[in-house]
Amino acid sequence: MANVKRRMIKVALAGNPNVGKSVIFNNLTGAHQHVGNWPGKTVDKKEGFHRVDDKVIYIVDLPGTYSLTALSVEEMIARDYIIYERPDVVVDIVDASNLERNLYLTMQLLELGANVVVALNKIDLAEKAGMRIDHRKLEEELGVPVIPTIAPKKKGMKELVEKIIELVEGNPRGYSGKTLCYEPRVERFIERLQGEVASREEITKLLNPRWVAIKLLEGDEDVIKKLSEIEGGREVIKKGMKLREEMSRELGDPEVVIADARYTVIKDIVSRTVGELKRLTASDLLDSVLLDKYLGIPIFFVILWWWFQIAFIGSAPFCDILGDGFAALGEVLTGITGHPFIDYLFFGEYGIIQGIGAVLSFVPLIMLLYFILSLLEDSGYMARAAFVMEKAMRKVGLSGRTIIPMIMGFGCNVPAVYATRIIPDENDRMIAILTNPLMLCGARLVFFSAIAAAFYGAYAGDILFSLYALGVVLAFMVATILRKTFFRGRASPFVLELPAYQKPSFKVAAVRMWDRGSMYLRKAVGIILIGLLIIGVLTATDAETLTFTTDPERSLVAAFGRSLAPIFTPLNWDWRFVVAMIFGFVAKEIVLGASAMLYGAGEEEIASRLASLYNPIVMYGYMTFILIYIPCIVTIAAIRQETGSWKWTIFAVVYGLILAYIVNLLIVTLGHLLLG
Amino acid sequence: MSRVDSSTYILASILSILYPLYGAIQFYKGAVAWWLPWIGGEEIQLGVKVGDAYIPNIFPDPFSGIILIIIGVIFARSIYLSKRNPGLADGFLFVGWILASMMLILNLVVLAADILDTYYPLIWGGEIEEPWTLGSDPWGISPHLILGIIAAPIYWKIKYLLKQLIP
C-alpha cells in the first residue's frame, strides 16, 4: 500500500531530432514502455516507467523539435504537454557536439518555466571534434543541472535519474532556472509586457508571464488564441499587439529580432562554457565562405547560373534531335491513313505527333536539370543555399527553400512544382506550388523574345527583364496574400540541420533523375495527348458544317474565340488573340505558332505582322496576360498531383486568369492614359 | 593553419584582377548589346586573334560578366584574409577554385554541345547548314575556360581541404 500512496514522478524527455533521445528513453524505461499516438494526432507517443528503489518515474518521450514556436504538430504537442500536463521535470537532451543549435530549445524551455535537467549527450563526439565543454560552468549559466551523458554506452544515466529525484524531492542545491536576459533594446519591450501579464492572476496561474510576453511579441497565434479564452487575456493581447507594432517599427520583424537576440545570448553562454576549438575543420571553413554574410548569396547565384547554363546549353542538341525527329516522323507519316481529318489531327503542323515531340523535346533538359540538382543536393550545398536565402524569402512569407523551385520555374514550371517536395512545411509548400506558375518559364520565353524584338527593338532586353521581374513581384504579392488568408501563420522557422558535405554519387543522381524525370514524362505525354486531341478536333472541324476544315478561321475553336472576344475587348484584343491564348493552355510555346497560323503569317513574320496591327502598349499587356494566366496543362497536372486537391488546382487556374486580366487591363488603361 | 604558400597567393592575386577585368568587359559588352546599343563598343576584346576567333573570346553577356566579377571578388577576399585569418583565406581560395573549375567545365560542355548541335543531322544522312568554327561559336574559348586553366594549379595547395571534406 505504501507504493500506492507514493507520488509518481512525471518526466518529459525533450530535445532536437537526432540527439539520442530515443536511446535515453530506452535506457531508462527498458521493457516498460508503450507506443501509442498523441490524442487526435498521428505522431507517435512513447511512454514508459523507470523504477529506482521504491520510486516510480513515469517518462514521456516528447516529439523531437528544434524550437517551441508551435508551427508544427510536433512543436504544439511538446509545448502543450509542458504547459498543461506540467511534468515534474523536463529532461532536455542536448547534443554536445552541436551545442549552440541545441541550446535554442533549452532557452525556450527555461522561458516556459519548466523544471529542466539538461542531459549533455554525445559528449564523446564533442570531445573528438576538439570541444571541451565545462558542464559545471554551463550549469551555472543556465541555473539548471547539467549531466554529461553518452547514451549508447549508458553513461550518465544513473546521475540523470538521481538529479531528477533530487529536483523533485526538495531541490537542496536550489536550482531555479536562470532568467536569460536579452539585449537591453529587446528586454525593454519584454519587461513592459511582462508587467502587464504578471498583474493578471488568471493568466499567471497557468502560464509563465515572461514566456507569454515573449510569445505575444513574436505574434504567436496559438498563444493569442489561448489568452483570448482566459479572463483578462484580451486586454493583454491588445497591449501585446501594440508593443509588437512599436517593436516592429523600431527594431524590425519582432520574431526575427527575438530569434537573433536568443542566439546572441546562446553564443555568449557557449563562448564562456566551451573551450576553444583545437582547429577549424574543412567543413567549418567551407561553411564560413558559403554562408558568408556578403558573399553567400552571390556565390549561390554563381552556382545557379552555372546550373542553368549547363542544363539549357548542354541539353540543347538532344532537345533538337528529339524535336526534329518527331517533325520528320510527322512528315513521313502524313497521308498514310488516307483520311485528311485523321492525317491533320495526328500528323499536321499542330497534330498529336508534333505535340508529343514538343513535350518530349523538353525531356533532356528536365533530366539534366534534375541530375545537377541531385548532385548539388547530395553534396550538401542545397541546404546551405536555402539557408543563405532564408532572410530575404521570409520577408515575403516564403520559406528559404522556396528559392529552388522558384528558380527552376524560370526553366520549366513542371519540374519546379515537383521540386517543391524539398519544402517540409505543408503550408509553405502549397504557397510555393500555387505561385510557381508566375515564374517566366522557357516556353513563354519563345513567344516573348520574338515579340519583344519586333515591337521594342533596342529595348527588347529591358522588356524581357521587366516580365521576369513582374512575375517575381506578383509571386511575392500572391504569396503574401495566401499567407495572410488561406495559409495563415508564418513561414516555418529555419532551424536547419546542415548536412555534412559529401562527394555526390553519380549513380544516385542518375536514379533520382530518372525517378523525377519519368514522372514528368508519364504525366506530360498522357495529358498532352488528350489536350491536343481536343484542340486538334476543334481546330479541324468547321463550326457551321461540322465537317473537316484546314481553315482555322472557320473552325470551332475560332467560333469559340469569337464568342469570348467581347470579354477581352477592354484589353483591345481581337478573337485571334483569344484563340492563341487558348492554344497556350496546352503548352505556352504554342502561342507563337498559333498566332502565326491565325494571322496567316509564318513564325518568322508573325512578330512584324503583329507590330503592324497593335501598338506596343496593347502588345505588352498581352504579354503580361500570357505570363500570368493559367499554367499550361502539364503544369496543371503537376499542381493537381502535388497538392492532391482539385480545389487548389482550380484555384491556381482561376486566380491566374483573374490576375492576368486585371494586370493587363491596368497596363492598357494606364499606358494609354500616360502615353496617349 | 593555412598550407597555402605565397606563390599561390600571387596566382590568386592575378586571378583576382583577371576575373573582374574580363567580367567587367563582358558586362559592358552585354549591356551594350542587350540594352544600350547606341553606346557602341561591342567589338572590345582582350585576347589573341587566332584565325577568325579571339582567345579568349569575350562574348556579350551581362550576367556572365557579373559571375566572373564575383569569382574575382572571392579570390580577392582570400588574399585580403591571407594575413588576418589564413584558415578562412584557404576557404575562400578553395571556393574560388571550385567555381573557376565549374566555369571551365561549363565552357567545355558548351563547346561540345554546339559542335553536336551543328553536326547531328549527319546522323540520319542530313545536311548541315553551316560548319562549326571557333569563330562562329557564340562562346568559343571564353575567359571562363582560360581563367579556369590558370586557376587549376591552386588544386595542389588546397587539396588537403578536399581530402578532409571527403575522406
Image: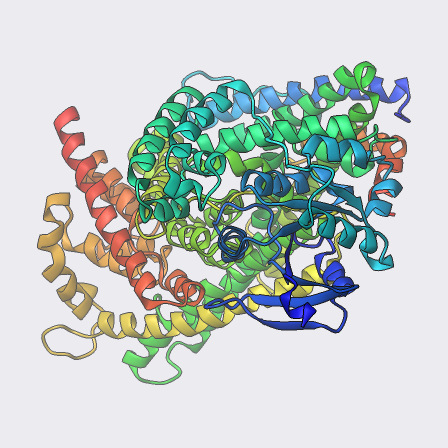
Is residue A79 visible in the rendered image? The answer is yes
Identify which residue is drawn at 65% across, 33% down.
A291
Identify which residue is drawn at 16% across, 73% down.
A542
Residue A1: image quadrant is: bottom right
Is A337 left or right of A668, judged from the image as shown?
A: right
Is A284 left or right of A292, judged from the image as shown?
A: right
Q: Residue furthest front?
A: A1
- Camera-nearest residue between B32 and A153: A153
- Camera-nearest residue between A29 and B12: A29
Identify which residue is drawn at 76% across, 26% down.
A272
Is residue B61 visible in the rendered image? The answer is no
Residue B126, percent across and down? 57, 62
Residue A184, percent across and down? 53, 19
Is B125 left or right of A148, judged from the image as shown?
A: left
Is A436 left or right of B70, judged from the image as shown?
A: left
Does residue A173 sit above or below A276 in this rendering?
below
- Camera-nearest residue between A406 and A91: A91
How many marks on residues?
Answer: 0
Q: Quadrant of the C terminus of chain A?
A: top left
Q: Residue furthest bottom?
A: A338
Residue B155: image quadrant is: top right
- Camera-nearest residue between A548 and A396: A396
Residue B148, percent across and down? 75, 32
Residue B69, percent across and down? 63, 23
Colour treatment of the image: rainbow
